[in-house]
Image: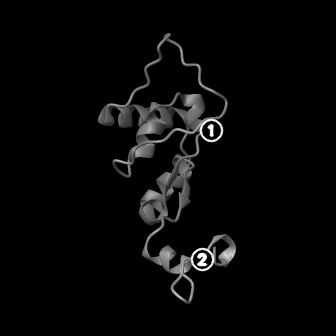
Amino acid sequence: MNVGRASRRSLAKLISAFAGARVVAAAGELDLPEQAIYYANHSSHLDFLTIWAALPAELQQRARPVAAKDYWGSGVRKAFAEQIFNAYLVERHGASSRRQRIGLGGQPQGPGGGHG
């Protein structure tokens, strides 16, 4: 799925219209740093889409959203996440990762697998 810049901008405008996302600059012009972390309060799985849509086009190309692999990691959602948005999909902690952090004696393990 090869999506060009014009298609991405159209998608961004659609998402912004739907979500009401927009960037308002105090002085009328954005002065964004070379590197930054943008984050949301995690109201839904669409948070990264909303933030991405609000970014200027030049930042959209460089942005690397982080998204939950259990939601975005299969089917058409995976294709959108990885091929359009260049998302980095991560495993979320939960029951399975909690079991990995608990040692044989039922005690939490520190970094590197040792008791901490």
Locate residue 13, reporting x and y percent.
40, 31
- Residue drawn at the location 50% of the way across and 80% of the way down: 99
Disc 2: CA contacts within 10 A as few (<14), some (14-19) or many (>=20): some
Locate residue 5, reporting x and y percent.
55, 34
Task: Tell me which colouring the rendered structure shows.
Answer: one colour
In the rendered image, the residue lying farthest to the top is: 27
In the rendered image, the residue lying farthest to the front is: 116
Locate residue 26, reporting x and y percent.
47, 13
Quadrant (top left/top right/bottom left/bottom right) for the C terminus? bottom right
Decide if residue 36 is on the left or right side of residue 75: right
Q: Amino acid at mark 1?
A: Arg
Decide if residue 34 is on the left or right side of residue 5: right
Q: Amino acid at mark 2?
A: Gln
Decide if residue 77 is on the left or right side of residue 34: left
Q: Is residue 10 above or below residue 30?
A: below
Image quarter of residue 23: top left
Disc 1: CA contacts within 10 A as few (<14), some (14-19) or many (>=20): few
In front of the other: label 2 or label 1? 2
- Residue pointed to by mark 1: 62
- Residue pointed to by mark 2: 109
Badge 2 or badge 1: first in the primary sequence? 1
- Judged from the image, the secondary structure of the residue bearing numbered disc 1 is helix
Q: Is residue 100 above or below residue 56?
A: below
Pick the front one: 109 or 33: 109
Locate residue 52, reporting x and y percent.
48, 38
Q: Are marks 2 and 1 in contact (CB under 8 Å)?
A: no
Pick the front one: 50 or 103: 103
- Residue drawn at the location 55% of the way across and 38% of the way down: 4
Decide if residue 68 is on the left or right side of residue 62: left
- Judged from the image, the secondary structure of the residue bearing numbered disc 2 is loop
Pick the front one: 43 or 52: 43
